[in-house]
Image: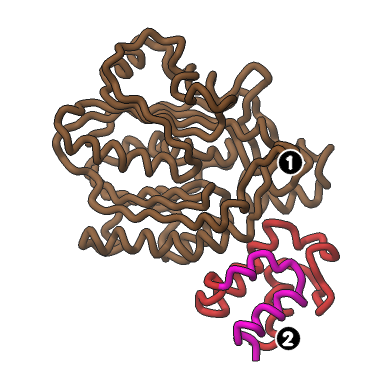
C-alpha cells in the first residue's frame, strides 16, 4: 500500500470528499470514534489481517501517525 | 447442563439517542447512530440501580423457589456500590434464602456470562451440585458523562437471571478464554478521571479483531466441527459496527449472528442472556457459540450443544 492508496482508503472509510496528509480526528468531523473503527477495519482488510497485530495503530488518529506506524512495520511501499 | 429459564430486566427509562443532542452535536450523533445501530437506550431512572434491576427479577414466588433450590449462585457485575459486602449480598440480602448454598461474585463485564456458564459447567461435574443460578447486572449509565460521545450513545442498563439444572450432560463442548491486562486502561472508571467511564474504542476493536475470531474457530476445531455446523453465533452486542466486523471476519450471516440491541444499547454482562432469551424457542438440540469480550480486556467463548 502506498500513501495515495491509504488516503483513498481513509476517504472511503469516512465517506468524505477530501483527505490529505494533514487530516486527523481533530480536523475531520466524520473521523469520530466509530469512524475511526471504519478506518481500522479498512486498513486491516487491505493488509490481509496484519493490522490487528499492530497495537499502536488503534490509537493513531491522524494520517501522519498512521503512515508512520505502517512504515515502521514495513507495511507501506 | 440444562437451561431451565432466563429472564431479563432492563432500565425503565427509554432515552432516544437523538435526544442527547443537547450535549452532543446532532450531526455527530446521527453518524454514530448509523454505525452503532443503536437508536434507543434503556437506562435506570433515578430510583433504579444495578441492585434493584437484579432484585426485581427475584420477586415472583417461582423465582424465589428457583433461587432457593440453587446450590450455586454466581453474580456477575461491575456496578457495585461499595467494596464490602459483595454485590451478591447487596442483591440477595432482602430475601429469606436457605443458607446451604455457595454464592460467588464474578467481577467481570461483557465476557462475564460466558465465564460464569463455564464455572457452572465445571461445578456440575460434581453431582452434589444439582441446580445453579447466574445473575448478571450492570448499570453503566451511573458512570457515564452524557457529553462523552464515545460512550453516551452506546450503553444501556440491564440485569438477567438464568436457572440451570445438572442433567448429567456436558453441554459445553469446547471453550477458549483469554485476556490482555496491558490493555486494561482501554475501558476504565477512575476517580481521578472524574469517576466516569472512559473507553478507547479503537484499541478494543483491534483487540477483538485479533482474538475473538481465532477464539471462535478454536472452539469449533476442538469440538471436531466445521463452522457450517454451528446453528447460532451469539456474539456480545457491543455495537453493530463491531458485530458486522466479526461477521465479516468469521464469514457468517446476519441470521446466524443476530444484532438485537438497537432499542436497548449495549447491555454489558446481560448482553448474551438477552440474546438467548430472545432466541430461546429456537435453541433445542442446537449447536451454539457464545462469545463475550470487553473489560480487562478479556474474552470468553464457549461452544454449547443444547
Residue A9 within the magenta-colored segment of the rendering: no
**SS at mark 1?**
helix
- State which quarter of the image contains the N terminus of chain B: top left
Image position of B269 (left or right of B187): left
Q: Quarter of the image holding residue B92?
A: top left
Residues beneath discs 2 and 1 located on the same chain: no
**SS at mark 2?**
helix
**In the image, what residue occupies the spot 70% across and 35% down?**
B16
Q: Which residues are magenta?
A: A54-77
Check whether the beta carbons of the residues at disc 2 and disc 1 lie within 8 A of each other.
Answer: no
Image position of A42 (left or right of B163): right
Say which of B206 and A1 sits in front. Answer: B206
* Colour assignment, chain B: brown
Q: Which chain is red?
A: A
Q: Can residue B6 be seen in the rendering of this structure? A: no
Neighbour tally class for label 1: few under 14, some 14-19, many 20 plus, Cα within 10 Å: few
Circle 2 chain: A
**In the image, what residue occupies the spot 51% across and 74% down?**
A49
Q: Quarter of the image holding residue B148?
A: top right
- State which quarter of the image contains the C terminus of chain B: top left
Counting from the top left corner in percent of width and height, residue B259 is at 50, 47
Counting from the top left corner in percent of width and height, residue B198 is at 68, 46
The CA distance from mark 2 to mark 1 is 42 Å
Residue tagged 1: B192
Q: Main secondary structure of the magenta part?
A: helix
Residue tagged 2: A4
Q: Seen from this angle, which residue lies furthest bottom?
A: A77
Q: Quarter of the image holding residue A41?
A: bottom right
Q: Seen from this angle, which residue lies furthest front?
A: B84
**In the image, what residue occupies the spot 81% across and 44% down?**
B24
Counting from the top left corner in percent of width and height, residue B295 is at 53, 47
Amino acid at each position: 500500500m502506498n500513501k495515495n492508496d491509504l488516503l483513498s482508503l481513509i476517504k472511503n472509510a469516512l465517506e468524505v470528499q477530501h483527505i490529505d496528509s494533514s487530516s486527523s480526528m481533530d480536523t475531520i468531523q466524520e473521523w469520530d470514534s466509530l469512524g475511526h473503527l471504519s478506518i481500522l477495519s479498512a486498513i486491516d482488510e487491505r493488509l490481509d489481517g496484519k493490522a490487528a497485530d499492530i497495537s499502536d495503530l488503534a490509537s493513531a488518529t491522524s494520517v501522519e501517525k498512521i503512515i508512520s506506524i505502517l512504515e515502521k512495520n514495513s507495511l507501506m511501499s | 447442563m440444562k437451561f431451565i429459564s432466563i429472564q431479563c430486566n432492563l432500565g425503565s427509562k427509554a432515552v432516544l439517542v437523538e435526544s442527547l443532542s443537547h450535549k452532543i452535536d446532532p450531526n455527530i450523533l446521527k453518524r454514530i447512530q448509523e454505525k452503532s445501530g443503536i437508536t434507543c437506550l434503556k437506562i435506570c431512572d433515578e430510583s433504579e440501580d444495578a441492585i434493584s434491576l437484579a432484585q426485581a427479577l427475584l420477586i415472583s414466588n417461582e423465582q424465589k423457589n428457583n433461587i432457593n433450590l440453587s446450590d450455586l449462585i454466581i453474580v456477575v457485575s461491575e456496578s457495585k456500590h461499595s467494596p464490602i459486602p459483595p454485590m451478591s449480598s447487596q442483591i440477595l440480602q432482602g430475601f429469606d434464602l436457605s443458607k446451604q448454598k455457595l454464592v460467588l461474585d464474578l467481577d467481570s463485564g461483557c465476557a462475564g456470562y460466558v465465564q460464569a456458564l463455564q464455572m457452572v459447567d465445571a461445578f456440575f461435574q460434581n453431582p452434589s451440585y444439582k441446580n445453579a443460578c447466574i445473575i448478571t447486572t450492570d448499570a453503566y449509565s451511573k458512570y457515564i458523562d452524557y457529553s462523552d460521545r464515545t460512550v453516551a450513545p452506546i450503553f444501556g442498563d440491564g440485569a438477567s437471571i438464568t436457572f440451570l439444572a445438572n442433567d448429567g450432560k456436558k453441554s459445553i463442548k469446547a471453550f477458549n478464554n483469554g485476556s490482555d491486562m496491558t490493555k486494561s486502561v482501554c475501558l476504565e472508571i477512575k476517580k481521578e478521571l472524574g469517576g466516569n467511564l472512559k473507553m478507547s474504542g479503537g484499541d478494543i476493536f483491534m483487540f477483538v479483531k485479533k482474538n475473538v475470531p481465532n477464539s471462535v474457530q478454536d472452539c469449533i476445531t476442538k469440538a471436531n466441527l466445521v463452522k457450517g455446523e454451528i446453528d447460532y453465533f451469539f456474539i456480545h452486542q457491543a455495537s453493530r459496527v463491531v458485530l458486522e466486523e466479526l461477521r465479516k471476519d468469521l464469514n457468517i450471516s446476519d441470521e446466524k449472528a443476530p444484532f438485537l440491541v438497537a432499542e436497548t444499547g449495549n447491555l454489558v454482562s446481560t448482553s448474551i442472556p438477552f440474546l438467548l432469551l430472545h432466541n430461546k424457542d429456537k435453541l433445542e438440540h442446537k449447536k451454539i457459540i457464545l462469545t463475550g469480550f470487553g473489560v480487562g480486556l478479556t474474552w470468553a467463548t464457549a461452544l454449547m450443544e443444547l
